[in-house]
Image (cartoon, coloured by chain):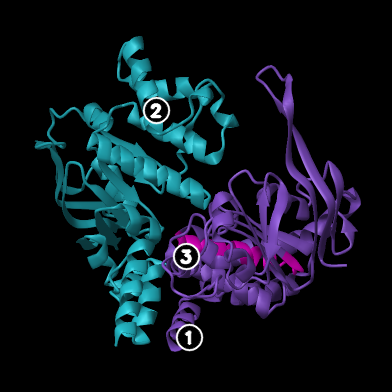
Amino acid sequence: MSMILDHVNYIYGQGTPLETKALDDICLQIPHGQFVGIIGHTGSGKSTLMQHMNGLLKASSGHIYFNGEDIYDKDYNMKKLRSKVGLVFQYPEHQLFEIDVFSDVCFGPKNLGLDKKETELRAFDALRKVGLPMELYYQSPFDLSGGQKRRVAIAGVLAMNPEVLILDEPTAGLDPKGRDEILCQIKQLQTDTGMTVLLVSHSMEDVAEYVDRIIVMNKGRVLYDDEPKTVFAHYKELEAVGLAAPQVTYILHELRARGLAVDVNATTIEEAADTVYAALGKVRRK
Amino acid sequence: MGIVRTQDLTFEYIRRDEEGNVEGITTAVDKVSLDIAQGEFIAILGHNGSGKSTLAKHINAILNPTEGTVWVDGMDTSDEERVWDIRRTAGMVFQNPDNQIIGQVVEEDVGFGPENMGVPTKEIWERVEESLKAVGMYEYRKHSPNKLSGGQKQRVSIAGVLAMHPKCIVLDEPTAMLDPKGRKEVIRAIRALNQVEEITVILITHYMEEIIHADKVFVMDSGRIVMDGTPREIFSQVEKLKSLRLDVPQATLLGYELQRRGVRLPSGLLTAEELADALGQSLGAE
């Protein structure tokens, strides 16, 4: 149960003067149940990569295997792939359209051809998973706050029962608490259901806090693919490609430069506080 | 009197149901009085729905107060005859650069504002040049805006406002859609406008680290201003900010976590350098 990308290339405007290699020899294996962060500056190929994973774009060459099957096989059921690999676009609340929240979430499963009862069960389950208060189910989606609308949009994709959930900047434009709430909920969902989650984000602090593995994209290639600590240790190289490390990494490097023996690889505030506290203790004992 | 002043500014809107019947009245801004001096760098924080954007739209006469008054450079914004003068005094930059750029070429886009104001052609080109230089985009003047990165586009939007020679610029989450490098570029450009060109800046953001250099911070909740002070005064109150769905910069948060573990540190440390200095002093004092 996994997704494998085998030497995937994608070329825009092939044979024209504007020919651009958007994906360049991508090889990745994403096992089931992993929480993966994808980072890269605007135009690095993140979105193109995501759109290959659920078949919205077809690779110019190479293969993608989902659960052992080649998705480019002529007998492969693309529609099924799209229900198994759910894609939540940026600002998904712009795609809400139904008269109430519940009908909006029903739209996906209804289109899968499920009967009314199953559709409604799925919608209830999805809305519960994103933690939306029950009294909002029959309100117009347009009366909700930004964070609530975004949950409804995510529920709409969850109602398709995907095995893989891909989110393109799910926290853009939300206040800090709203960011934490949505990401906590997604993490919880991933832990409870064993779903694979791919999170595209421009917030290094969020990525550091939540994911097991980071894939860094640059110029259509995979620049780094490792656990957060290892990736953020390359903070100078990340800056060169328009990214950064979490702020806390810079703080720890500053402290280290001033002679405090901290572990610069801590990526969350909690870890940083631990290592600074321990380093202070050592200085005191001397 | 300052460049922007509001007296008991209140803005209400009527909520209607599907049939157009009145459901209730929402007070988005509630008796806000503030006075902003020419040349200040002001930050406005607040969770989604706290009234920040509604307040901002009053400064540019996009909205008019239900009650109370707003003066921009001494002009009452509800005076319809002065609307164009007000808009050229206080320019506005929004979240999504793609919605704000209309020209096919960068320099044409920047020239659009002054051209509409009837500025003589020769002067338009002078203004375009100085505005693009101010945001560090002069070398891209012949480029097509749609080939630029998010941060570059946003700086072109700022140059477009700048070319109208405003005394004040209001920016409503200008970095929400940008990657780390784009964010850094835009914030650097905004600070330069404030320090070099001495333009009053009013910045709305959800990224706490962007406003540590502000002269003054206003925090909004339920349409009211609930906190105001320097960044240090505001960020010293970690618990209170969290209860308002906000956050503090990571350096401040790390200092706070260390305080909680018993390390003697002052509150409201804003940068890595300040934290390092304070830790050094804390060790030296023992």
* Callouts 3 and 2 in the same chain: no
Closest to the observer, A55 or B279: B279
Residue B10 percent across, percent down from the top left: 80, 44
The kind of secondary structure the magenta stretch mainly shows is helix
* Callouts 3 and 1 in the same chain: yes
Which hue belongs to chain A?
Answer: cyan
Occupied quadrant, residue A228:
bottom left
Q: Nearer the viewer, mark 3 or mark 2?
A: 3
Q: Nearer the viewer, mark 3 or mark 1?
A: 1
Q: Residue A128 carries which label?
A: 2
Residue B141 visible in this rendered orientation of the protein:
no
Q: Which of marks 2 and 1 is in front?
A: 1
Q: Distance between the residues labelled 2 and 1?
A: 50 Å
Residue A257 percent across, percent down from the top left: 35, 85
Q: Could you tell me which quadrant the C terminus of chain B lies in? A: bottom left
Q: Residue at x 47, y 87 (%)?
A: B285
**Label 1 sits on what residue type?**
Gln
Q: Which mark is residue B253?
A: 3
What span is in magenta?
B147-168
Residue A178 percent across, percent down from the top left: 49, 46
Instruction: Name above or below for residue B267 compared with residue A107.
Output: below
**Label 3 sits on what residue type?**
Leu
Q: Which residue is drawn at 38% across and 54% down?
A: A201
Residue B22 percent across, percent down from the top left: 74, 22
**Label 2 sits on what residue type?**
Arg
Left or right, A154 with respect to A212, comes to right
Indicate which disc, 3 or 1, sits on the residue closer to the N terminus: 3
Label 3 neighbour load within 10 Å: few <14, some 14-19, many 20+: many
- Would residue B163 be counted in the magenta stretch? yes
* Callouts 2 and 1 in the same chain: no
Left or right, A5 with respect to B183, comes to left
What kind of element bears circle 2?
A: helix
